[in-house]
Image (tube, grey):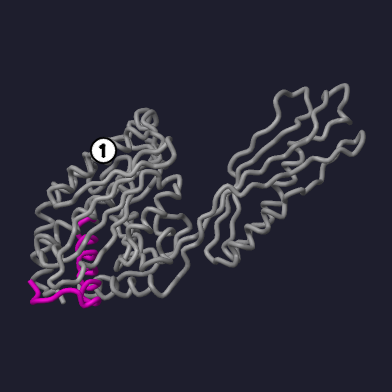
């Protein structure tokens, strides 16, 4: 157990170095790392590797199989157990990419700046601030508890394409973290009434492409011959909307629609993109079945000879839910006990958005929301009346959250009976 004197010393150390940590964030935010800017993502990877090198981490760059994305980054520091056993492994998960193209950052004058407690900039909370949180945890452990720092093999895994849920990073993470004590995910953390929220469940998601094939005809001279693909798609969209069931937290969203070519032609093609989300695995599967049942759905035919529109639903990708589970609940209990030691309180949170935790929860204990507190993730706009504001992180949230994460990590290691010798 950590002595309260150690908490005090650790807090002082982190506070004394906060300007250094914020400067690390400044350097990261200065690099545009939009997912579809692979050179920028790779530049941030090189910078991150350089920043963690003084902590003893070795860098490995892993190319994505998709040329549109940059390289994933794995930073490793091998641990040395006090006996002949292999050092235990802990995975620390963040990502390199953001959702902001460089032109958008420039158009909205969106850059690193500090206004009071708010630190603005692309990725400050999602998720470059989370990467800085990882650095703070490791730096704090190295300073106050070197026997723990040296006794663990640390794997920091940074996804090059998290914002588009690139599946190859999931496979890579599972390969590297099999048998680890835990996967700790550093998406931004929220608070409610002074309580820290830690993410213990996330919705799953499926993405679909709906295509409609009709029959074209001259809109004036031969209208009865046409089978209007756009009208058919409208009926399909209504059917999709009726699949949403808020009582079971199953949602469908038609995100894009396209179709037709010119106004004087009955359109022969139309398409839509759809995403579906659900927490419960059985509800998720029912949603998939409901969407695929719309294949060959037909309500529109030509008046001339009954030519039918044809509907095709393609499941483009699926990411399973991260449901409540015993392993995650066990990690939450570790963080809750650490919070109590610090006079804090944490509460579990389920989030509708996905993270890299969705890839890992069924392989090893996983918890999320360990990053600093902020708001307006994915937003670059601001207005004079304050109704729109840009993404920011709260500078004051770094030290308390880092202290909580360090205390919980120590409890995690202690509970696994992997630390020998006296406390420091």
Residue on which the image places disc 1: 112
In screen coordinates, is 51 left or right of 424? Answer: right
Q: Residue at position x 35%, y 32% from top?
A: 105
95 lies above or below 194: above
* Residue 85 location (% of width, % of height): 19, 71
In screen coordinates, is 16 left or right of 258? Answer: left
The boundaries of the magenta stretch are: 398-424
Q: Residue at position x 28%, y 70% from top?
A: 335
Quadrant showing the N terminus: bottom left
Extreme residue in the right direction: 305
Looking at the rendered structure, the secondary structure element under dot 1 is loop
Quadrant showing the C terminus: bottom left
In depth, the one of 106 and 168 nearer the eye is 168
In screen coordinates, is 281 left or right of 403? Answer: right
197 lies above or below 241: below
Q: Dot 1, how many residues are within 10 Å of its Cα: few (below 14), some (14-19), or many (20+)?
A: some
Name the quadrant containing residue 163. top left
In screen coordinates, is 110 left or right of 411? Answer: right
Q: Is residue 219 shown in magenta?
A: no
* Residue 341 location (% of width, % of height): 20, 75
Name the quadrant containing residue 96. top left
* Residue 21 location (% of width, % of height): 17, 48
104 lies above or below 363: above
Q: Residue at position x 30%, y 66% from top?
A: 180
In depth, the one of 34 and 147 nearer the eye is 147
* Residue 24 location (% of width, % of height): 19, 44
The secondary structure making up most of the magenta span is helix
């Amino acid at each position: 157990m950590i002595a309260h004197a150690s908490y005090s010393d650790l807090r002082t150390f982190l506070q004394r170095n906060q300007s250094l940590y914020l400067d690390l964030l400044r350097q990261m935010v200065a690099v545009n790392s939009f997912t579809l800017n692979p050179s920028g993502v790779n530049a941030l990877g090189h910078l991150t590797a350089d920043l963690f090198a003084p902590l003893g981490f070795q860098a490995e760059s892993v190319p994505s199989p998709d040329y549109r994305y940059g390289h994933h980054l794995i930073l490793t520091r091998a641990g040395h157990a006090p006996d002949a056993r292999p050092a235990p492994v802990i995975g620390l998960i963040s990502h390199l990419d953001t959702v902001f193209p460089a032109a958008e950052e420039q158009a909205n004058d969106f850059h690193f700046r500090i206004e009071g407690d708010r630190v603005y900039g692309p990725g400050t909370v999602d998720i470059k601030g989370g990467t800085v949180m990882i650095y703070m945890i490791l730096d704090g452990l190295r300073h106050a508890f070197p026997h723990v720092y040296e006794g663990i093999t640390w794997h920091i895994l940074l996804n090059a394409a998290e914002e588009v849920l690139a599946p190859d990073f999931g496979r890579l993470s599972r390969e590297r973290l099999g048998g680890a004590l835990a996967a700790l995910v550093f998406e931004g953390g929220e608070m409610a009434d002074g309580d820290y929220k830690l993410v213990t469940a996330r919705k799953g998601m499926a993405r679909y492409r709906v295509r409609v094939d009709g029959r074209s005809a001259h809109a004036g001279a031969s209208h009865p011959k046409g089978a209007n693909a756009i009208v058919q798609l409208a009926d399909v969209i209504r059917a999709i909307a009726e699949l949403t069931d808020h009582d079971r937290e199953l949602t469908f969203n038609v995100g894009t629609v396209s179709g037709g070519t010119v106004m004087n032609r009955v359109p022969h093609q139309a398409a839509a993109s759809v995403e579906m989300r659900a927490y419960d695995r059985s509800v998720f599967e029912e949603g998939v079945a409901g969407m695929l049942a719309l294949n060959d759905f037909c309500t529109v035919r030509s008046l001339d000879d009954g030519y039918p529109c044809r509907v095709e639903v393609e499941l483009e990708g699926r990411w399973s839910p991260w449901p409540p589970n015993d392993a995650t609940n066990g990690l939450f209990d570790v963080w809750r006990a650490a919070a109590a030691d610090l006079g804090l309180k944490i509460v579990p949170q389920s989030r509708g958005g996905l993270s890299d935790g969705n890839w890992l929860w069924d392989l090893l204990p996983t918890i999320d929301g360990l990053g600093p507190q902020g708001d307006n993730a994915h937003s670059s706009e601001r207005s004079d009346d304050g109704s729109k504001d840009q993404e920011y992180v709260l500078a004051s949230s770094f030290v308390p959250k880092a202290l909580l994460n360090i205390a919980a990590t120590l409890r995690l290691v202690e509970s696994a009976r992997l630390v020998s010798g006296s406390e420091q």
